[in-house]
Image (cartoon, rainbow, N blue to C red):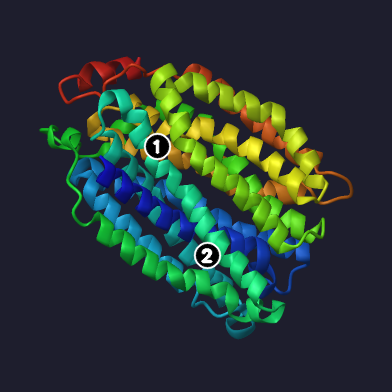
Amino acid sequence: MTRLAAASLAGTAVEFYDFFVYGTAAALVLGPLFFPTFSPLAGTLAAFGTFAIGFISRPLGSVLFGHIGDRYGRRPVMFGSLLLTGVATVLVGCVPTYATLGAAAPALLLVLRFLQGFGLGGEWGGAVLLTAEHAPEARRGLWASFPQIGPAVGFLLANGVMLALSAGLTQAQFQSWGWRVPFWAAGLLAAGGLLLRRSLAETPQFREITEPARMPLAEVLRGHWRLVLLTAGALAVGYAVFYTVSTWSLAYGTERLGVSRTAMLGSIMAAVALKGAATPFAAMLGDRYGRRPLCLIGCAVIALWMFPMVALLQTGRPVPMFFGFLVALLAFITIFAVIAAYLPELYEPRVRCTGAAVGYNLAGVLGGALTPIVATALSDGSGPPWGVAAYLTGIALLSLLCFALLPETLPARLPTAESAAPARDSAAA
């Protein structure tokens, strides 16, 4: 289990590094480099638009890689998704700017961002199922949470590199070539992740399936459509909060409040680091007290904290901003630490890779793709951006309702092939 957890964590860290480094670049430099004819606000919105494309392609990737995972095994998914995301990220660092290619430059950026998201759409399902389906029942939440630490590690790597380059280079150097270095580094990280995953074994749950689903997506839509919609709505709040903190607040703080890039990145990174460290502890609480109660608590805290978080951000001072981000991210991880075990427990083995991944990545469209764009538009004006806080509070209440409609799964064994039919009939009812 230690080897499996390490390989899953390393892979998700690399893939989320690829995904996050684009978000940081979108907040800092992509607007003027690829949309120079736009106003500063419109350029930032356009850069966040290309950022959103990665979320829109993630459900499509989860369909393809989910099909592979349900028909041919979880292991191939972990290789294919990592390879695709790594190659696309390296190529982003090679795209000439608008000054060289004109309109073709942002078009290429869109294509590569689409491929990034497509690969990441398959990564989560493969990595989580590899650990969840190997894990002992009593510690399934703990072991399955290790891939959930990967996003924090990836974020810290991406922003750590950006922070070092931003501090060590002049503004002209950073905009000329410095921002490309983190994208090029993705190639080395992806190669290391592939080496770690080469000796992984297929999961026992998949080996027990005698007749893999021929069309997993069709089975999910026919028998579990309500479950997919509820999980997508339930998890939307996590994406919205995380990308508000990690992406929108970075752009807002540097452009509107005049806070230095170093101070903003430092405040966000410190909060993300503590969030990552708290992940296994929240998962152990899920193993002890249940998945759903922690999710409900996390949603309630987020709903209550969004207005204080915006007020702390508006101070423009690193310590208050850090505290505001930290509380929001600890509430976020209270939810996302347990869903790595929660989602697999909701689906039968034949369609587990597709169902869990599609629900998870649809939430990314609802909560992650639009949030930086909506938040940027809502914050266009004088005074604190209370509209952003109201928007996030509304999403938190929606997610709270969706979690209230989902069943508890603890104590629960992952359904076996023999128990799949009753589970499917019950979910359909």
Q: Nearer the viewer, residue 218 or 178?
A: 178
Residue type, label 2: Leu
Q: Is residue 59 above or below residue 352?
A: below
Q: Nearer the viewer, residue 153 or 44?
A: 153
- Tell me the residue at 46%/60% (across/down): 18
Asked if one can make out residue 237 in the rendered structure from this viewpoint, the answer is: no
Q: Is residue 309 left or right of residue 7?
A: right
Quarter-of-image position of residue 227: top left
Q: Is residue 179 left or right of residue 11?
A: right
Residue type, label 1: Ser
Q: Which residue is mark 2?
A: 110
Quarter-of-image position of residue 409: top left
* Callout 2 touching callout 1 (CB < 8 Å): no
On the rendered image, what quadrant is the C terminus found in?
top left
Q: Is residue 39 above or below residue 74?
A: below
- Tell me the residue at 43%/30% (across/down): 283
Q: Position of residue 13 (x, y in %)?
A: 42, 53
Q: Position of residue 176 (x, y in %)?
A: 63, 81
Of discs 2 and 1, which sits in the foreground?
1
Q: Which residue is mark 1?
A: 145
- Element under disc 2: helix
Q: Earlier in the sequence, mark 2 or mark 1?
A: 2
